[in-house]
Amino acid sequence: MAQQVKTAPEVAVGPVTLGDPGPLGLSAFALTIFVLSVINAGFLSAANTTVVVGLAVFYGGLGQLLAGMWEFRSGNTFGATAFTSFGAFWLSYAVFFIPGFGVNLPVSSKGSALGVYLVGWAIFTGFMAICALRLNGALLAVFVALFLTFVALAIGNFSNLAFWGHLGGWLGILTAVLAWYAAMAGVLRSTRGPFQLPIYPMR
């Protein structure tokens, strides 16, 4: 008689519950752009720009890339596209200051090259702002302010006028504040905090 083989009982596995990666991505972007914008606005000398490199790699860069991947896992195409792209933005920005990558822009065309770089990011941010129209007012405000930041910084690089760079710095600070607001609203919702911040849903 053939011996019966006992099999282990099947165990039902429920769906994996994920936390909301949005506040992480927003916070990572907010802090990184805040530090850079304080320099662009003229509060610190441009010689201090390298202080952003660590943030751009590990928080604004890797932090947002991770948030983007988790947004993909949760099915949020908008969040995944935004966080992954801006994580890559900060990593690409950090490369300008890391000698090992060999990015040495000619002085004669550096402003124009950075201007084109910023215009490209302004275009991306602009269409993401349009996509945010059906989400909520808090996110829309972040993307509109960031779009204006990129435009001002691009003009500053093309024209070599300090006014536009400083304006871009102030707009970047505003963007950081708005991003922190949206991040805090998300954390308060998840923790059932003692109060809630309105995000003005637009659906």
Image: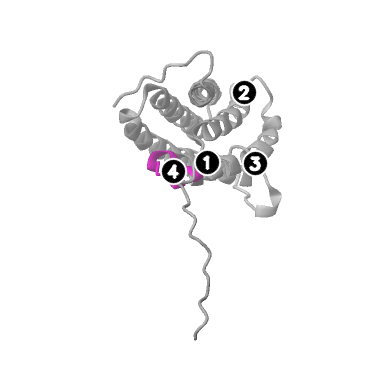
Q: First in sequence, mark 4 or 1: give its number.
A: 1
Q: Which residue is mark 1?
A: 67
29 lies left or right of 71: right
Please check the rendered image and state whether residue 145 is part of the magenta-colored stretch, yes or no: no
Magenta region: 70-79
> In the figure, residue 169 lies in which quadrant?
top right
Q: Are marks 2 and 3 in contact (CB under 8 Å)?
A: no
The CA distance from mark 2 to mark 1 is 25 Å
Q: Amino acid at mark 3?
A: Phe
Q: Which residue is mark 3?
A: 58
The C terminus sits in image quarter: top left
Residue at point 32%, 32% (across, down) = 130
Q: Secondary structure at mark 4?
A: helix
136 lies left or right of 91: left
The CA distance from mark 4 to mark 1 is 10 Å
Q: How far across and how far down the image is residue 49, in percent?
A: 67, 33
Q: Secondary structure at mark 3?
A: helix
Q: Amino acid at mark 4?
A: Ser
Q: Is residue 108 in view from this perspective?
A: no
The CA distance from mark 4 to mark 2 is 34 Å
For the residues carrying marks 2 and 1, which lies nearer the camera in this image?
1
Between 17 and 180, the one nearer to me in the picture: 17
The label number, if any, that marks residue 74 in the structure image: 4
Q: Which residue is mark 2?
A: 38
The CA distance from mark 2 to mark 3 is 19 Å
Assess disc 4: are there few (<14), some (14-19) or many (≥20) residues with their C-alpha within 10 Å of its C-alpha: some
